[in-house]
Image (spheres, grey):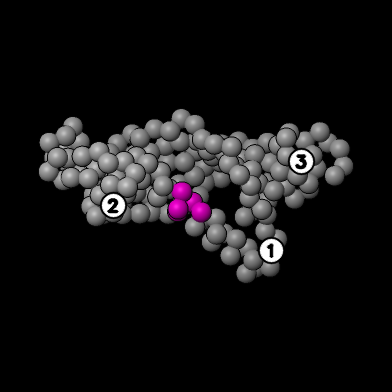
């Protein structure tokens, strides 16, 4: 992971893509969101969706897996180049989650992240808070999911927000 100081506002990164299969949609939904339009193709065809579609929580879970994988790839590349690697802290949460269009069996969703804001943390000296917009588009370019998330990232300079020396 890059250090807080090295992540510019406006930076955009592709975090990966995933194709949702009918079997995967049913498996996830059976365990976590057992509504008929997620678990049964015939019932889904009669629903307002018109076909089997993934749970929004499934779409979000796939984003999380790809996001963690993407960060791991960045760490491997930085380490291989001999560059220092920053720690990533917890996420204080997300907001404005929108499931904009259904994700149907066979859809491939590509995810991207854009840094919206960053600020030194007032409560965690040596850390900064990065706020990002995360979106997923289907193979037709339609936005299917969007939300804003934040995460703590280690600061290189380790200067607390109050300006005192560490």
For marks 1 and 3, give the one nearer the viewer.
3
**Which corner quadrant of the image does residue 42 belong to?**
top left
Disc 2 element: helix
Identify residue for label 1.
Answer: 83
Q: The N terminus lies in which quarter of the figure? A: bottom right
Asked if one can make out residue 133 in the rendered structure from this viewpoint, the answer is yes
Q: Nearer the viewer, residue 39 or 46?
A: 39
Identify residue for label 3.
Answer: 125
Q: Nearer the viewer, residue 78 or 104?
A: 104
Disc 3 element: loop
Disc 1 element: loop
Instruction: Say if mark 1 contacts mark 2, CB within 8 Å.
Output: no
Q: Does the segment drawn in magenta span residue 67?
A: yes
Give left or right: position of 65 versus 106.
right
Give left or right: position of 103 versus 6.
left
Instruction: Say if mark 2 contacts mark 3, CB within 8 Å.
Output: no
Q: Residue at x 73, y 39 (%)?
A: 124
Q: Give the magenta range.
A: 64-68
Distance CA(mark 1)–CA(mark 2): 41 Å
Q: Residues within 10 Å of mark 3 (few under 14, many from 20)?
A: some
Asked if one can make out residue 5 in the rendered structure from this viewpoint, the answer is no
Q: Nearer the viewer, residue 106 or 10?
A: 106
How many marks on residues? 3
Identify residue for label 2.
Answer: 27
- In the rendered image, residue 64, in percent from the top left (x then y), is placed at 46, 48
Distance CA(mark 2)–CA(mark 3): 43 Å
- In the rendered image, residue 84, in percent from the top left (x then y), is placed at 70, 61
For marks 1 and 2, give the one nearer the viewer.
2
Distance CA(mark 1)–CA(mark 3): 23 Å
First in sequence: mark 2 vs mark 3? 2
């Amino acid at each position: 992971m890059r250090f807080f100081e090295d992540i510019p506002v406006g930076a955009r990164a592709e975090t990966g893509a995933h194709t949702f299969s009918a079997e995967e949609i049913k498996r996830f939904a059976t365990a976590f969101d057992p509504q008929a339009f997620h678990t049964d193709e015939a019932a889904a065809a009669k629903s307002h969706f018109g076909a089997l579609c993934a749970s929004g929580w499934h779409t979000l879970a796939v984003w999380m897996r790809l996001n963690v994988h993407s960060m791991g790839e960045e760490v491997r590349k930085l380490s291989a180049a001999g560059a220092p690697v920053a720690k990533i802290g917890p996420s204080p949460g997300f907001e404005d989650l929108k499931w904009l269009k259904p994700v149907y069996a066979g859809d491939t969703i590509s995810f991207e992240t854009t840094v919206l804001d960053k600020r030194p943390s007032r409560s965690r000296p040596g850390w900064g808070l990065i706020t990002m917009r995360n979106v997923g588009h289907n193979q037709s370019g339609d936005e299917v999911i969007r939300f804003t998330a934040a995460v703590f990232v280690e600061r290189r300079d380790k200067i607390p927000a109050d300006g005192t020396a560490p």
